[in-house]
Each structure stands twice: as structure tokens, then as C-alpha cells.
Image (cartoon, rainbow, N blue to C red):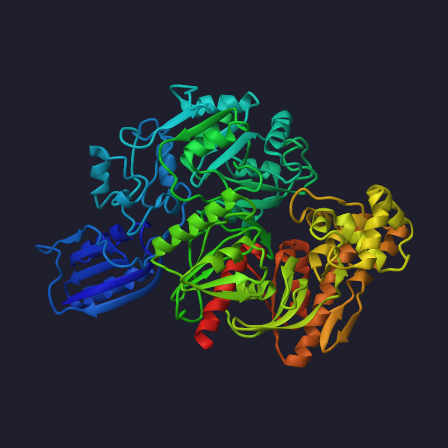
């Protein structure tokens, strides 16, 4: 009996061909297996029952890194072309449009780490040890199918020992494309900004001496360069802040192992699984309060949480072992630009930041920053989706009639490509503010389009005409532009993240998004599905005095809310006014006057900013969302009181008086309540207004599912308490897990909406 088997999904670069070879050989089947543009093809010849067993075990026992989406079996009625009853791995077929999917980069496996630490092994202390179960994938892939000549390992010819492993079916490096060793693979170097060698011999040990001496070290990782200092060194951490011009935003910390992680933070079972998973993200964890001085104050100033990660490359393991202490490991980039990944550019652009460069000669083809996750209601929730996750696909409920590009937002940008039912979201790119960021954005779209065999015929974009991503969409000559409202995209993103498509009550709370009426939205209750939406409620609009200046200076939003309270502020207003100085009166007058210089917004994020300023938490910010983040961390976890907010109807739409929460906070502050109590009651008040609005909309529509999206729901305190109360009220609640609730998930929502509209128009 002869059959041809087509396997589609993430099946290249994950050990699938060696797995098939071993399975077929054990079952006594003849034939061949190979990669092609669509995935993996298998030709089999043998007894019917053995082929049936092969097909059962093919899906049941697939390699852990594989993600099979479809298996198609076609009888051939002839013997398979294996040759003399053997089963062979054959050369890849490179013709045709790519249809397969690429694996994310995978953290070093336990077997490779054992070799790294074994003095008797030929890969002892070799910083590029990898096998079929781990190592670089996406970041070294130039084209498909995934074979060594089409990766950045093409320039490293395998030695006889590596070739023997590569061709041995019993070896875990059987057809592992990045396989190498000290005799034939990439080499490590320690250099200065002029590319002058700084050490010979044991390079990781020399690099560790730079760190222990208080220096700033640039380290080339899987998807780009990082800047490192010893995390316990206050002077070094402060100097890194100065050089990177990063005033307050926390640095991530890499620790050698779980034991070291537990010395710094509270690590429960969920956090342990996240830290040790094959994607190895940065995990935001509560800091231990019983230990002082475990990391320098400058690492995460004023933060109750710390972003921890474990080593995910052999080089990181060697560096941590030699340093003997946790290290700061933060993306190496200039302000507002993507992570540096090109060697020459890194030396040119980071020379003023780094004292030395720990680099190597394996090129990075695609940049990928670290992923960031946080535990919410007992599961990991992504705040930034990048290395280790991208480009694993999302499955849409329907086949897209045409290829779609979701162009994403202006901040925390990603883009998304849809082919058929697959939606592939790019690694995190960052803010599209400067030339380098825009160049990286355009190059990333071109690379992914070629890699996936997608030429977008539809370009979904935000309504905001000044977003760089909008301008990019409108510049494409062969793609139909499809505008998608920002908050509809948020809710659609949550639906796609959960594999849903039906109509829901969508709660989209964020900083700002261009509304369908041309005003600035941000505190929205929508009735939405993937095709359309209706604005059913929102926070009452307030002016933003100074426009974008009010985003950077939360005290301006305090002035705007106070201007609407008719002098009811009392001593709290005096305190904020005193801190604002001479600008207070003019900004308050601007808020009362309104107009183009004080545009109206329904933003929930700006409401959080106002309360943070009034409570004395933060008058100005140095990174997005800082005031709200610090307000959340301040909240008393035991406080159960909640500020009330009035809800009225105007033209059939629910309008929520956010000013009521501000008034209640002012009264508490005037009465002597501390900021932790005020913060908790404010958060609880926001939770209650969400539940009340959703309940009212359920009574009108019969909808019982709520989708929560937007950057405000990256606030764990608000998210957890809101979900709990909604579920107690009888709602089914959808939240994010696979893409961020913030703007990093916008591209998926845009693409899903455009594909649905294309199908149902």
C-alpha cells in the first residue's frame, strides 16, 4: 500500500523530519520525508495496519515544538520512492509559494546545558550549543523551507563530527539545521566600540570581569543586543540609566536559576512555569519585602514588582555563572528606536553606552526583543509578545478571501499578516516615532511577507490619519486600505485571541484612540463582533489641556477634572496647583475654554492620570502609563470600598461620570485618607462602573459575554477584580493571553476585522 501524507503547521525547524524517519523506521515502512514550501511531505509504502499506526502516532507523538494544523493523506497505489525498502530524509523541495510556518526561537534545552557543563564533552563551554529541540529559529531564518543554506548558518560548513551527528538518525542533532561546534561554528569575541579585541582565551570570563568592575557590557543575544550591568551595583545601574537616558522605567533582571529568582521575588507555581518555559520571557513578579539590597535601587525605582528572566542561550548561562550575581539585561537601543541587531550598527550607535561588546559572528537576520508576561488570575498574560512567541500563528474562525496586512498602532507596534485562517503577528517592534523605527517596520513587513508567501491585497489600518502605520497602509499600491476603529480593533483582538467571533459587550479602556466621530476615545463600551461595532457607552468626555502635553503631564488632567468641579476641590487642588506653579491658572483656564488646544477625550487612561496626580503619586511621566502603574502599585489590597459614579443616558448611549470618582477621591484626601486607600477605592469604583454598564447592556441586548481589552486592563488589580465581579454577576468574560491587551495586540484585531469584512461584505 502506498500513501502520500501532507503535514502543515509549525513543522520545520522542530525536529519533525527526524521524528518521522524514526517512526517510519520502527514500523518497518519504506519511503521518504522532506520539507517543501507548504510544510512536510511524507511518502510511505507498507502494510495497511502499519501505515494506520504511523498516522495515529504522527499526531499523537509529534515533537514538543511542533504544532500540527492539518494532516492530509492521499492513496497513491504505488510504492513510495524510498529506495530498496528504506526510509530516507531527502533534500527539500524549494519550488512553490511558501505555505509553512516558522518556529519561534527556543531556550537551550537540558541536554545541551549538560554538554555545556561537561569538561569531557567536545562542546564544553561552547556558547552556541544547540540541537533539534532548542536554539535559534526565526531570528536566523532568511527564507523557507527551513534548511541550513537558507539560514544565517549558511556560512559555517559543518566539520566531520557535526556532519556525522547531522546524518545519524539516533542522534538528537539529526537534521538540526544550526548544529555546530568549536571546530566549525560561530566564535565569540569581546571588543570595544572600535571593534578592537579586548580579550583572548576565555571570553565569557573576561566579559564577566567587565561587569564585576562596574562596566556596561553590550551582549549579542538571539534577536538583538542588550546592555548589561551587575544588578547589585548601584553606581553601574545609575550610570546605565544616565547613558541610556531612561529616567524611571524599570530594567529587567536576568538571574542564573530559580533559586536566585526566589531570593529576589515571590515565585509561585505559575511563575515558575513561566520562568522555565521554552520561551523564557521576562516575568513581572512581586518583590520580596523581607530582603533589602538584593538589587540596586536604580534597577526598578519605586517598583513593587521586578521583571525577572532566566538565561535562554548558552552564552547567557556562561556569563551568569562567571559573573556570580544577577545582571540587568535591557534592550540596547537609542530612545524611541527598535533593539539593535546589526553588528556594525551596534558598534556605531551603542559606543557611547557600552564599555565593551560581547559579540559573535553568527548574523541575526530578524530582530526580536524579549517577551514580557505577567500572572493574571493564575495564568500568564503577555504584555509584550516577541521572542519565544512570535511568529506562532492564531487561527481565525474563517478563511480570509484575500491576504491581509494589519498595520498596527503607533505605539507598541506589531503588524499582522493573514493567509487563509492563519494570522501571524510579528515580534514587538516598539513605537513608530523615528526614521530607524519606520525603516525596521517596513523591512519587517517585507521579510515576513516573503517568508510566508503573502502579498497583502488588503491593508487594515487605524482611523488616525497621522499614525505612521496608517500612512504606510495608504502608500501600498496593490492593497485595498480598510480603516478599523481603534477600540473595535482592541475588542476584535480579544475575540481572535480567544478563538471567538460572536457579538459581545466589549469594554475597551486605554489611553487614546481616534473615534469614529473624530474625537479622542478611550473609555468605551461597544456592542461588537469581528465585522462591526456600535458605541453603546463611554466615559463622559473631558478636555485634554495642551493635547499630548496632558499625556506627559498628568497634573494637566487633574486640572481639567477640577475645572469641571466648580471649586469643590479644596486643599487638594491647592497642593497640585502649588506643584504646577505658574502654569496652573493658564492650564485650568484652557480646560474651561476648550477648543483645539484642549480636545475632548473619553479616555480611561487620562482618568487614572488625574487621580494619580491628585493623590500625589505622579505629576509628570517619563514612560507611557507610568502614573497609572504607580497608582496601581500603591493600592491597599485589603480595602474594599468603592467610589460611586453616576451613569446617565444621552441619545440612547450610556455616559459615565468619571468626575464623580475624582470628586470622591478629593473628599477622601481632604478627610485624611491616605493615597493607598484612595487608590484602592478608585480601582474598585472603576470595576463597579464597568459591571453596572455591562449589566445594563445585557438587559437591553441579551448579550452575556464581555470582552475586556485595551492597555488599562494590563492593570492586574483592575483586571482581576473586574473579571471576578463580572463572573459573579453571571457574565462569561474574555481576556487576553496570547497577545497583549494594549496596542501590541491591535494589529491582530485590525487584520481579523478586515478579513471578516472581506468575507461578509
Residue at x 49%, y 44% (from the top left corner): 369
Decide if residue 62 is on the left or right side of residue 706.
left
Instruction: Name the one closer to the observer, 121 or 623.
Output: 623
- Residue 376 picture location, percent across and down: 60, 55
Quadrant location of the N terminus?
bottom left
- Residue 67 picture location, percent across and down: 37, 58
- Residue 545 picture location, percent across and down: 76, 53
Quarter occupied by residue 123: top left
Residue at x 81%, y 50% (from the top left corner): 587
- Residue 562 picture location, percent across and down: 84, 56
Instruction: Name the one closer to the observer, 585 or 418.
Output: 585
Q: Is residue 679 visible?
A: no
Instruction: Name the one closer to the observer, 549 or 321.
Output: 549
Outermost residue, left side:
84
Q: How many marks?
A: 0
Q: In this rendering, is residue 202 above or below 613?
A: above
Q: Is residue 293 visible?
A: yes
Quarter occupied by residue 654: bottom right
Decide if residue 725 is on the left or right side of residue 5.
right
Q: In this rendering, is residue 47 above or below 82?
A: below
Q: In this rendering, is residue 743 above or below 70?
A: above
Q: In this rendering, is residue 528 above or below 415?
A: below
Residue at x 13%, y 61% (from the top left corner): 80
Amino acid at each position: 500500500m502506498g500513501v502520500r501524507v501532507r503535514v502543515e503547521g509549525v513543522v520545520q525547524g522542530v525536529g519533525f523530519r527526524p521524528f518521522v524517519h524514526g517512526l517510519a523506521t520502527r514500523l518497518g515502512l519504506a519511503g521518504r520525508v522532506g520539507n517543501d514550501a507548504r510544510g512536510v511531505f511524507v511518502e510511505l509504502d507498507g502494510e495497511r495496519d502499519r501505515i494506520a499506526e504511523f498516522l495515529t502516532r504522527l499526531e499523537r507523538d509529534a515533537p514538543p515544538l511542533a504544532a500540527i494544523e492539518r494532516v492530509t493523506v492521499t492513496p497513491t497505489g504505488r510504492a513510495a520512492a524510498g529506495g530498496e525498502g528504506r526510509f530516507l530524509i531527502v533534500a527539500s523541495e524549494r519550488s512553490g509559494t511558501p505555505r509553512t510556518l516558522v518556529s519561534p526561537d527556543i531556550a537551550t534545552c537540558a541536554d545541551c546545558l549538560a554538554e555545556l557543563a561537561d569538561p569531557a564533552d567536545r562542546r564544553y563551554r561552547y556558547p552556541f550549543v544547540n540541537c533539534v529541540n532548542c536554539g535559534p529559529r526565526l531570528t536566523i531564518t532568511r527564507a523557507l523551507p527551513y534548511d541550513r543554506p537558507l539560514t544565517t548558518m549558511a556560512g559555517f560548513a559543518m566539520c566531520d563530527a557535526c556532519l556525522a551527528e547531522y546524518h545519524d538518525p539516533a542522534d538528537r542533532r539529526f537534521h538540526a539545521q544550526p548544529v555546530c561546534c568549536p571546530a566549525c561554528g560561530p566564535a565569540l569575541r569581546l571588543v570595544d566600540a572600535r571593534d578592537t579585541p579586548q580579550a583572548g582565551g576565555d571570553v565569557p570570563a573576561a566579559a564577566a570581569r567587565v561587569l564585576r568592575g562596574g562596566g556596561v557590557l553590550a551582549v549579542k543575544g538571539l534577536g538583538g543586543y542588550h546592555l548589561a550591568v551587575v544588578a547589585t551595583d548601584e553606581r553601574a545601574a545609575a550610570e546605565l540609566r544616565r547613558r541610556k537616558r531612561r529616567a524611571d522605567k524599570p530594567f529587567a533582571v536576568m538571574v542564573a536559576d530559580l533559586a536566585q529568582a526566589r531570593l529576589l521575588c515571590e515565585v509561585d507555581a505559575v511563575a515558575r512555569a513561566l520562568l522555565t518555559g521554552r520561551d523564557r520571557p521576562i516575568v513581572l513578579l512581586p518583590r520580596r519585602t523581607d530582603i533589602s539590597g538584593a538589587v540596586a535601587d536604580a534597577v526598578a525605582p519605586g517598583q513593587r514588582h521586578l521583571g525577572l528572566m532566566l538565561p535562554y542561550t548558552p552564552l547567557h548561562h556562561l556569563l551568569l555563572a562567571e559573573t556570580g550575581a544577577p545582571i540587568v539585561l535591557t534592550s540596547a537601543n537609542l530612545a524611541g528606536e527598535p533593539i539593535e541587531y546589526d553588528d556594525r550598527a551596534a558598534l556605531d550607535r551603542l559606543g557611547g553606552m557600552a564599555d565593551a561588546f560581547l559579540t559573535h559572528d553568527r548574523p541575526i537576520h530578524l530582530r526580536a526583543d524579549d517577551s514580557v508576561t505577567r500572572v493574571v488570575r493564575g495564568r500568564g498574560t503577555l504584555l509584550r509578545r516577541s521572542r519565544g512567541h512570535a511568529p506562532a500563528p492564531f487561527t481565525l474562525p474563517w478563511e480570509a478571501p484575500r491576504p491581509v496586512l494589519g498595520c498596527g498602532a503607533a505605539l507598541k507596534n506589531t503588524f499582522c499578516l493573514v493567509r487563509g485562517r492563519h494570522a501571524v503577528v510579528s515580534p514587538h517592534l516598539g513605537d513608530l516615532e523615528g526614521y530607524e523605527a519606520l525603516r525596521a517596520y517596513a523591512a519587517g513587513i517585507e521579510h515576513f511577507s516573503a517568508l510566508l508567501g503573502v502579498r497583502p491585497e488588503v491593508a487594515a489600518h487605524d482611523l488616525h490619519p497621522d499614525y505612521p502605520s496608517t500612512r504606510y497602509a495608504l502608500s501600498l499600491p496593490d492593497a485595498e486600505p480598510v480603516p478599523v476603529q481603534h477600540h473595535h480593533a482592541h475588542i476584535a483582538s480579544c475575540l481572535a485571541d480567544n478563538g471567538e467571533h460572536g457579538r459581545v459587550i466589549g469594554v475597551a479602556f486605554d489611553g487614546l484612540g481616534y473615534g469614529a466621530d473624530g474625537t479622542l476615545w478611550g473609555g468605551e463600551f461597544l456592542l461588537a463582533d469581528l465585522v462591526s461595532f456600535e458605541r453603546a457607552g463611554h466615559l463622559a468626555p473631558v478636555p485634554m489641556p495642551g493635547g499630548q502635553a496632558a499625556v506627559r503631564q498628568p497634573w494637566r488632567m487633574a486640572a481639567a477634572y477640577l475645572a469641571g468641579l466648580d471649586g469643590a476641590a479644596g486643599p487638594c487642588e491647592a497642593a497640585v496647583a502649588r506643584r504646577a506653579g505658574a502654569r496652573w491658572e493658564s492650564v485650568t483656564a484652557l480646560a474651561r475654554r476648550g477648543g483645539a488646544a484642549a480636545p475632548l477625550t473619553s479616555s480611561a487612561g487620562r482618568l487614572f492620570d488625574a487621580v494619580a496626580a491628585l493623590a500625589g503619586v505622579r505629576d509628570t511621566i517619563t514612560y507611557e502609563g507610568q502614573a497609572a502603574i504607580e497608582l496601581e502599585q500603591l493600592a491597599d489590597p485589603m480595602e474594599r470600598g468603592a467610589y460611586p459614579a453616576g451613569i446617565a443616558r444621552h441619545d440612547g448611549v450610556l455616559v459615565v461620570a468619571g468626575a464623580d470618582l475624582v470628586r470622591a477621591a478629593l473628599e477622601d484626601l481632604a478627610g485624611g485618607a491616605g493615597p493607598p486607600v484612595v487608590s484602592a477605592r478608585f480601582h474598585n469604583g472603576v470595576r463597579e462602573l464597568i459591571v453596572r454598564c455591562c449589566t445594563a447592556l445585557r438587559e437591553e441586548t441579551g448579550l452575556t459575554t464581555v470582552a475586556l481589552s485595551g492597555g488599562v486592563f494590563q492593570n492586574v488589580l483592575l483586571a482581576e477584580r473586574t473579571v471576578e465581579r463580572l463572573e459573579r454577576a453571571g457574565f462569561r468574560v474574555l481576556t487576553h493571553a496570547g497577545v497583549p491587551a494594549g496596542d501590541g495586540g491591535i494589529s491582530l484585531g485590525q487584520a481579523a476585522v478586515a478579513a471578516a469584512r472581506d468575507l461578509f461584505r
